[in-house]
Image: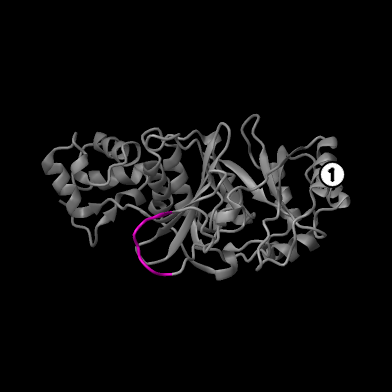
Amino acid sequence: MKSFPQKVDLKNLSPSELLEFLGSFGKERYRSVQILRWLYQQGAESFDEMTNLSKRLRQEISQVSFISVLRPLCIERATDGTRKFLFQLEDGNRIESVLIPDKTRLTLCVSTQVGCALGCRFCLTGKAGWRRDLKASEILNQILAVRKMLQGEKAITNIVLMGMGEPLANYTNTLKATALMAHPDALKFSSRRITLSTVGLLPELEALSKERTPFRLAISLNAPDEETRTYLMPINRRYPLHKLLALCRKFPLQRRIRITFEYVMLEGVNDSSSHAKRLLRILAGIPSKVNLIPLNEAPEIPFKKPSEERVRRFQEILMEGGLTAIVRNSKGREISAACGQLRGIRSEGGTEPFEAGHDTSSTASGND
């Protein structure tokens, strides 16, 4: 058997890497399919559970690899059914995931980084800065952990990469994880039920345009002009709005698929009728829809939520101009699980999982 300097986490391996890994010590190709199904469809957490593998094979694999698992440190539940999960990673860092119920869907919002380096002015996630990227296994284990908690309940129907962090800043691990989300021998989610949200990192978006990606694309836009977007999102200095939109215009999309543009609405900043009309103009020619997200206010955020009348008028202008515009009223506010509020920070004290009703001591999320 080939020796390895340290044990390999099987959930950090793509299907082709798993095949190569098993082949490196003489195992048959079909074993990779068996292991994938055990890990992602059966949720196996130990090699002993893989009963269609011989005892000898399980012993051999366990000598060179392991199966990582995430357990929620805390689960908070809002009155609207939203649940927020706090996970502690092996190095002590913490991340959050949010489970969002709807009439026909149960959406899990997962994190891709510990913290965020982008510093958008309306979002709490980046207030504590960026600590590190998540491994593919840590992205996938959020899904597996929540799915295990839901046994006997409605199953997760949609995955959104809109939690802590910028997914495309963690490009390799994010793409490896999304490939396993959609793989027929792994999590088996339809590509129409996986959405990746990005601020628009142009080199990574350009690379993404050449990949066969198993997800829908959402762009965090939040302003219809360079000056306002730079004020709200410092990344716009490096990757300006006009270049982002030019790339979106040529981005290859499957038939009947549109890019979603997310627009967090801030009173007196980006919510006027003139802003709406400019947004209509700049999105012309891009197959798109717009999610309007009234701000989730917090003491640390220097903005206010617009009035319902102002939000409705903004939406009307877009729809009258032929754009699909949906107002997304964020859920889970009283447990800080709404858009822009994830932080993965909680006071220390105990590591046993528990479920809380309306504890607001931690803050949560990226983009519903």
Q: Does residue 212 appear in the picture of this structure?
A: no
Residue 281 sits inside the magenta stretch: no
Q: Does residue 50 appear in the picture of this structure?
A: yes
Residue 182 point in image, percent of width and height: 45, 37
Residue 289 point in image, percent of width and height: 71, 39
Identify the residue position indicated by label 1 in the image: 313
* Magenta: main secondary structure: loop
Q: Is residue 350 above or below residue 281?
A: below
The residue depicted at 81 percent of the width and 53 percent of the height is: 271
* Residue sitting nearer the eye, 169 or 333: 333
- Amino acid type, mark 1: Arg
Q: Is residue 30 above or below residue 238?
A: above
Residue lying furthest right in this view? 274
* Residue sitting nearer the eye, 1 or 270: 270
Q: Which residues are magenta?
A: 348-355
Residue 350 sits inside the magenta stretch: yes
The residue depicted at 24 percent of the width and 43 percent of the height is: 23
* Residue sitting nearer the eye, 249 or 90: 90
- Tag count: 1
Q: Coloured how?
A: one colour
The residue depicted at 11 percent of the width and 43 percent of the height is: 56
The residue depicted at 60 percent of the width and 56 percent of the height is: 203
User: Image check: 59 left or right of 13?
Assistant: left
